[in-house]
Amino acid sequence: MSLWLPFEGTDGSTTITDSGPTRHTVTAYGNAKISTARGDSCLYLDGTSGTFLTIPDHADFDFSGGNFSLSCWVNYADTDITAIGQTIYYQQTNDSTNAVHLYLYDLSNRRVEFRITQDDNAVLQLKGYKDCFYTNNWNHIEVSEKDDDYYLLVNGKMVNHVTSSYRCANYTGLVYIGSVINLVKFKGYMDNFVVR
C-alpha cells in the first residue's frame, strides 16, 4: 500500500493523515475538511475555488511500471450537471498536456473516466457506461492496471476494460485530490482513499 487516507478525525478538522507506510504529507486547501455529516468521518470538499488536497510527488505515485491501483469511496453531491467533471485523482508534469486523471464526467449521465494524456493527446481513455454511479450516495470507484490490462470498476462491477501498451509516465508534479489545479473541482464526500 502506497497511500491510505481513511479521513479519520473530528468534524471540521483540516488535518489529513496518511495511514500508509510512507506517511505522505497531505495538505488541505480552502474548505477541504473532515466531516461527520454522513455518519463516520470522511473528507468533505465543497467544490469552491481553491478547495482540494495535495501530496508531494514520490516514487509511490510512479505508475509507469504497469502495475497499480487507485480506489476510494465517493459521495457526489453537486447538482450542477453542466460542470466539466469532478476530479478524484490528478497528477501532471509541467502542464496538463502530460497527465493522469481519474474523474466523474458527463454528469447528466453519471459516468466515470480514467485518462492518460501524452503531449496533449488522450492516449488512453477508460470510460464507464451511462448511469454507472449514484448521486448523493456512496460509490466505490477503482481503476487498476496489471501489465497492459486496465480495469475500471464501480461498486464492485467492471464498467470497462481495455488492453493498451500506453502507460502512465513518472509524473513529477503534485498529486491533487479533488481538483485539477483548481479546475474540475469535486463537490461532495470522499473516504478511504487508497493507492497500491
Image (spheres, grey):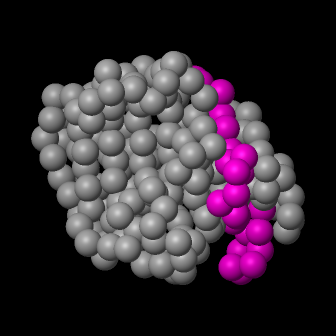
Residue 110: percent from the left, percent from the top? 37, 71
Q: Is residue 102 above or below residue 93?
A: below
Residue 171: percent from the left, percent from the top? 46, 22
Extent of the magenta region = 34-59
Please indicate, yes or no, whether residue 22 appears anywhere in the rendered image.
no
**Is residue 3 left or right of 27 when viewed as pictured?**
left
**Is residue 103 left or right of 182 when viewed as pictured?**
left
Residue 48: percent from the left, percent from the top? 70, 57
Q: Is residue 50 magenta?
A: yes
Q: Is residue 25 above or below residue 133?
A: above
Q: Is residue 19 magenta?
A: no
Residue at coordinates 39% horizontally, 60% vertically from top-left? Answer: 105
**Is residue 51 left or right of 189 when viewed as pictured?**
right
Residue at coordinates 48% horizontally, 78% vertically from top-left? Answer: 135
**Residue 40 image-quadrant placement:** bottom right
Please indicate, yes or no, whether residue 102 appears anywhere in the rendered image.
yes
Residue at coordinates 33% horizontally, 53% vertically from top-left? Answer: 113
- Seen from the viewer's position, the closer of residues 65 and 184 is 184
Which residue is situated farthest in the left direction here?
A: 163
Q: How many marks?
A: 0
Residue at coordinates 32% horizontally, 21% vertically from top-left? Answer: 119
- Seen from the viewer's position, the closer of residues 131 and 71 is 131
Q: Is residue 166 above or below residue 29?
A: above
Which residue is situated farthest in the front direction here?
A: 82
**Residue 166 image-quadrant placement:** top left
